[in-house]
Image (spheres, rainbow, N blue to C red):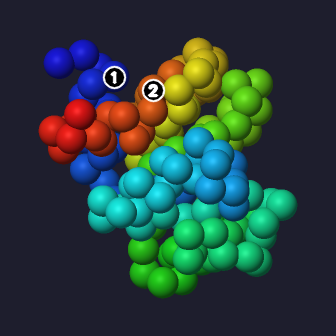
Amino acid sequence: MTGMQDAVRKMLGMKTVAIVGLSDRADRPSHEVAEFLQQHGFHIIPVNPRHAGERILGEPCHASLQDAARAIRDQGGRIDWVDIFRRAEDTPPVVADAIAIGARGVWLQLGIVNDAAIDQARAAGLLAVQDCCSKIELTRQLGLS
């Protein structure tokens, strides 16, 4: 099993995921992926400053990953991993935030490649995946494809 496959398997075994860049529009990939994860037992935590204070997929949306982590900690939980729907050049600050909040992994979605951000995550001991869709990988893992 490759390092990336191992990271995919481990992250999909952790059930609390912050979705950074989650859209409220059902036709957007972030919404489709988040809804799929939610339907398969994941606790999704929306993060999008444009929708902070609103609800997306029934969950309160947070302005930042730090705000989301505080809210989840106040409920006695933690964010296990961060699923990132942002442009590649915007991922390093999100990865830095994921490290700061104590997430165990970061996932850059299909088409998002930033080797420096991935190296940053791995250097901090996080699981890290890029250019890969969590919905597709969960579908494979569940044998639904």
Amino acid under label 2?
Answer: Cys
120 vs 31, nearest the viewer: 31
Quadrant in the rendering for residue 7: top left
**Where's the N terminus, which quadrant?**
top left
121 versus 116 height, above or below: below
Q: Residue at x 54, y 32 (%)?
A: 109
Q: Which residue extends farthest front?
A: 27
41 versus 82 height, above or below: below
Q: Is residue 123 visible?
A: no
33 versus 66 height, above or below: above
Q: Residue at x 59, y 21 (%)?
A: 111
What residue did someone put label 2 on?
Answer: 132
Quadrant in the rendering for residue 62: bottom right
Q: Is residue 32 left or right of residue 86?
A: left
Quadrant in the rendering for residue 64: bottom right
Q: Position of residue 127 (x, y in %)?
A: 39, 35
Q: Which residue extends farthest bottom?
A: 75
Q: Which mark is residue 4?
A: 1
Q: Position of residue 103 (x, y in %)?
A: 48, 51
99 vs 31, nearest the viewer: 31
Q: Is residue 69 left or right of residue 5?
A: right
Amino acid under label 1?
Answer: Met
Q: Residue at x 69, y 49 (%)?
A: 21
